[in-house]
Image (cartoon, rainbow, N blue to C red):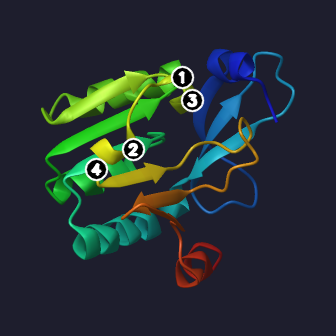
Amino acid sequence: MITNENFLTSNISFENQDGVNGRTLLLIPKDKKGKFALMYEYEKEVIKKRTRTLCKKYNPQKVLEIGFGLGYTATELQKNKVAEHTIVEAHPEIFKNAEKWAEKYPNVKLVNSFIQDYEYKEEDYDFILDDRLEIVYEYEKTPRYKVNNKWHIFFTSQDLKEITK
């Protein structure tokens, strides 16, 4: 686990790693003591599929997305024509990537903050997707989503089988 400060001052890198299929988005602390995997390229298709499935099932219009990563989920949400899309991303480099991505989506509001520091009302959103990094807040199970006032785990057991093939 790392502190919020270490998270904010860490570098990111998208690179190949031994034993991993495809590239990995890595968080590299300034002290260079380890690397933390944020996302894997091989997750992309499963994330896209799961997001499409949830959009089809719930037709979300006001979305709060916690964590941008590589933008896989955000892009799928936009393809499903959500009306309002708020993305909360704490890491400055990832936030810059999100800003560039959001230039083509006028319905996106970006917030550079940890979700714990961002004031919002859950009832203002019909869909909340929480995909934060657990190395900062390891007591919370992510990725997860909230719809109809109930939290659910984002990946199904079938999704996990596809990811770990």
Q: Which residue is mark 3?
A: 116
Q: Is residue 102 above or below residue 53?
A: above
Instruction: Point out the tag, 4 or 3, that comes first from the N-terminus.
Output: 4
What is the spatial separation of the Cα atoms under label 1 and label 3, in whole angstroms? Answer: 4 Å
Q: Could you say whether the residue bearing mark 2 is in a helix, strand or loop?
A: helix
Q: Which residue is mark 4?
A: 75
Percent across and percent down for residue 76 are 28, 57
Q: Is residue 97 left or right of residue 100?
A: right
Percent across and percent down for residue 142 are 61, 55
Q: Is residue 125 above or below residue 157?
A: above
Identity of the residue drawn at 26% across and 70% down: 58
In front: mark 4 or mark 2?
Answer: 2
Q: Which residue is mark 2?
A: 122
Tag 1–tag 3 contact (CB < 8 Å)? yes
Tag 2–tag 1 contact (CB < 8 Å)? no
Instruction: Point out the tag, 2 or 1, that comes first from the N-terminus.
Output: 1
Percent across and percent down for residue 164 are 65, 75
In front: mark 4 or mark 1?
Answer: 1
Q: Please state which amino acid type lies under the numbered disc 1.
A: Asp
Instruction: Point out the tag, 2 or 3, that comes first from the N-terminus.
Output: 3
Q: Is residue 50 above or below residue 2?
A: below
What is the spatial separation of the Cα atoms under label 2 and label 1, in whole angstroms? Answer: 14 Å
**How would you rate the neighbour count of disc 4 (Cα within 10 Å): few for under 14, some for 14-19, many for 20 or more?**
some
Tag 4–tag 2 contact (CB < 8 Å)? no
Identity of the residue drawn at 71% across and 28% down: 28
The numbered mark at residue 8 is none
**How would you rate the neighbour count of disc 2 (Cα within 10 Å): few for under 14, some for 14-19, many for 20 or more?**
few
Tag 2–tag 3 contact (CB < 8 Å)? no
The numbered mark at residue 117 is 1
